[in-house]
Amino acid sequence: ELDLHMARTWKERKLGVYHPNSGVENVTAKMEEWLQTVLDKVHEFRKGLLPENSGLKKEDCPPICVLRGDHSDTEFGFVVRSNATAGNGVVDLKEGITHVRGDGRVALEDAVPPSDIPVLRIVTND
């Protein structure tokens, strides 16, 4: 499993600015530091969305309605190609992509809150 909250993973797997087609000629140490800072902030934000990290109790949350779409194939899984020269693998963003039902951005199965959030209704388009 890849830890996408670590800049070194992006560098090793040639993601984002490290990808040969990114248009970025040279990734400086300052750019790498900035990327890690952003990834750290994203990680903290995502952790804060989990009820066990928010301090909220189930009884403090009103029931919600979830609206989700299943009208588009949604990219879900990618192949990591072997790279003997670099001693690691590179994520292939063009071939071997697994698709699941979703709205084109979020997989249907991921478009629900954690189980301890009360849900009044889940509405999925037909």
Image (cartoon, grey):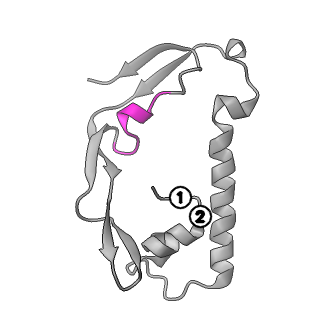
- Mark 2: give few (<14), some (14-19) or many (20+) Cα within 10 Å: some
Q: Which residues are magenta?
A: 104-112
Q: Which residue is mark 2?
A: 6
Q: Using the rendered view, name the quadrant where residue 101 is placed.
A: top left
Name the residue: 39% across, 81% down: 20
- Disc 1 from disc 2: Cα separation: 6 Å
Measured from the top left, where is residue 80 in percent x and y?
Answer: 33, 65
Marks 1,2: beta carbons within 8 A: yes
Furthest toward the bottom, the residue is 25
Relative placement, left or right, of 48 versus 18 is right
Relative placement, left or right, of 71 versus 15 is left
Q: Using the rendered view, name the quadrant where residue 91 is placed.
A: bottom left
The answer to which of 66 and 43 lies nearer the viewer is 43
Q: Using the rendered view, name the quadrant where residue 28 is placed.
A: bottom right
Measured from the top left, where is residue 27 in percent x and y?
Answer: 56, 83
Quadrant position of the C terminus in the picture: top left
Measured from the top left, where is residue 99 in percent x and y?
Answer: 26, 46
For the stretch drawn in magenta, the main secondary structure is loop
- Mark 1: give few (<14), some (14-19) or many (20+) Cα within 10 Å: few
Q: Which residue is mark 1?
A: 3
Above or below, 64 relative to 22: above
Secondary element under disc 1, as helix, strand or loop, is: loop
Name the residue: 66% across, 83% down: 29
Which amino acid, by three-letter code, is at mark 2? Met
Q: Is residue 106 magenta?
A: yes
Which amino acid, by three-letter code, is at mark 1? Asp
Measured from the top left, where is residue 60 in percent x and y?
Answer: 72, 15
